[in-house]
Image (cartoon, rainbow, N blue to C red):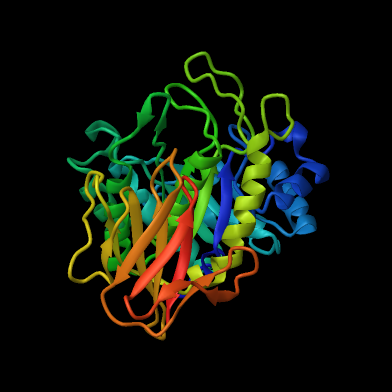
Amino acid sequence: MSQPDICKRFMLSFWCAPPPEETTLQRYHEIAECGFNVVLPPCGAWSRELNHQILDLCQKTGLKAIVGDSRVIAKQPDDPDFEKNLDAVIADYAKHPALAGYFLVDEPNASAFALLGAVNRYLLKKDPKHLPYVNLFPNYANEQQLGTKTYDEHVARYIEEVQPALVSWDHYALFENGERGIYFENLEIVRRHCLQAKLPFVQIVLTVPHGPYRDPDEADLRWQAYTTLAYGAKGILWFTYWTPPFDPQWRFRNAIINEKGTPSAKYTILKDLHQRIQAVAGVQMRLRSMGVYHTPPLPAGTIGLDAKSPVSECDSPEVLIGWLRDGRRRDYLWVVNRSFKESRRVVLRLRATVREVGELSQYDGQVRPARYEEAGRILRTDLLPGEGGLFVLA
């Protein structure tokens, strides 16, 4: 089965599009100017009319939309109107040039996998160009939420029973008083299952302070993006774009567009970050993850450099090294500074002799000579807190 069109390009998207009263051409130009390419639905507001309004605005601004329509999962597979119902949804949207896919559900319990599988397979059969989109729980969800004993089982069953074209989940690691210790374990689990199933994955990370979560600064935003890239992701989504309505429990505030409806400092930070990501996104889409390594202190669920790694030594603490390979068997390294506070001068020793090493520019995507000494197999790079660089071993 061919991939939906949106799975063929790196996805930059978000939770919570502008609400209905702010669904205007000006607002959608604002989204496009920030470097996003896919729009998810507004939070808590779906209708056929609004969906077509969003699709038309996306067409005018070069964006694509995943639409939310409650009919998508309204019928059980044994309902005589199951196929007729989905045919009506497809008829309403599939011919629109700005359609990217259909939103099915957020954070389903495993008990919903049979329904989601039936819907997913039917939509892909009848409309293979467009993605049926489901977002999974993170690994800090409990057994009752997951419907399985473990998170590993939850992801494995989801892939087996639903047969998705892409795997998505959310993970918010940035607390006011530190970071969630199992963030990388979540990436490890999904990466492993997606490699086995030959599926792309995307991760949703944090922009909006709420509840126990802090207001992410520039280093926080970089850290979330580059760590996701180093694991081989084919997209990054942000929670949220528009600040959700104030909730006394969660106290949502200051998202990319703040509660006053104006761009926060994150808008400018992410506009620059998205330009950097887009510069290397074409290469990222062609790469397959071969291994992921950390230098001490090792986060939960991760491993240090081993005999398989193309890097034999790294002198710096808190470094993440993602090893990827393209179809021509060229090796690439994402080197990421895991520190939120300290810049790093990272020195890597490669395991095998390499004639030269190039760095992919995050300004124009061109390969430029890296700071590499062939005699000692030494690669050097300087990284800001949370920053990453992508290198190709010639």
Residue 74 image position (x, y, % from top left): 48, 43
Number of numbered labels in the structure image: 0
Q: Residue at x 17, y 70 (%)?
A: 307
Residue 221 image position (x, y, % from top left): 52, 42
Closest to the observer, 240 or 339:
339
Quarter of the figure that contains the C terminus: bottom left
Residue 392 image position (x, y, % from top left): 44, 75
Asked whether residue 48 is in view, the answer is: yes
Closest to the observer, 361 or 266:
361
Q: Residue at x 65, y 51 (%)?
A: 272
Q: Residue at x 73, y 29 (%)?
A: 261
Closest to the observer, 389 or 67:
389
Residue 186 image position (x, y, % from top left): 30, 47
Q: Quadrant of residue 230?
A: bottom left
Tell me: residue 377, above or below residue 59: below
Asked whether residue 129 is in view, the answer is: no
Tell me: residue 360, above or below residue 82: below
